[in-house]
Image (spheres, helix red, strand yellow):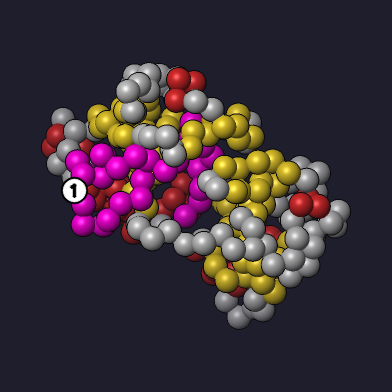
Amino acid sequence: MRRRFTYFVLAALVVLAAGASSTFAARDGEQTYVFNGRLLADAGSSTSLYVDINGGNRPALKKLVGQSDNQYFAVDSGTQFLRWSHGVPTVVAESNLVAADIVSVQVRAARDASLAQIEATPASRVADRGPTPGHAGKPLWLFVGSLNAPAANGKVTIHVQSGNWLALRKMLGQPQDQSFSYGARTIFILWRSGVPTVVSPSQLRVGDRISIRIRAPRADSLQEAEQVPASHIGDHEPRTPA
């Protein structure tokens, strides 16, 4: 089993390095484009958002080559607006988004779509982190898997199936079943139909897809990181495109 998981992790690392998550999302002819930036105008009840783009995922950045940093993105009644505060997301109205806020715009569109076509497609989700979201002082360890047992006594045990580059590197040669710590400051979020709700550890269900985020030094071992209380634990969290 350990050798099998080592092969799994090695394959996953290759997938991450190649940016294949976008490829998987695009098997149906579409993919998710993520544009990050700062709002240049209050959203109000407009049918578009004006954003000064300073980042995004690989598919989005490829479309921006040779284009202006300032772009308009369509939104409509089907767009979900999330406001993040102290690690907790809340569904809000479009009018809550104001100039200078840091936003992340997600759009589903064809792989061969032009930037203009992408921008004309209403965004599926817009996340707003306010004007000064701050920066984490330690790197992120992300583990994703199915919950093995009810959370109890400050521990959550999952069958690890994926994660980010740092987490998967530390999983090399380790069993897939791992226990992680949580504490009084750990935020538990349950996602239902894309809508987040703050819950208690006891509301996590065995078998659910769990995402565990830990902020710990890059040099830590897996065992050391597991002793650090998770900052955020998500249940059925939407997958974030790379």
Above/below status of 54 relative to 151: below
* Residue 41: x %, y % from top left: 78, 67
Residue 225 on the magenta segment = yes
Quarter location, residue 144: top left
Q: Tell me: 154 left or right of 21.
A: left
Above/below status of 17 relative to 189: below
Q: What amino acid type is highlighted by mark number 1?
A: Ser
Residue toward you, 95 or 11: 95
Residue at 62% in and 70% down: 53
Residue 96 on the magenta segment = no
Quarter location, residue 9: top left
Q: Quarter of the image for the N terminus: give it.
A: top left
Q: Residues within 10 Å of mark 1 (few under 14, many from 20)?
A: few
Above/below status of 205 relative to 71: above
Residue where numbered disc 1 is placed: 221
Residue toward you, 76 or 43: 43
Magenta span: predominant SS is loop
Residue at 61% in and 55% down: 129
Residue at the front extreme of this rendering: 184
What is the magenta range? 214-242
Residue at 65% in and 48% down: 83
Q: Tell me: 81 left or right of 240.
A: right
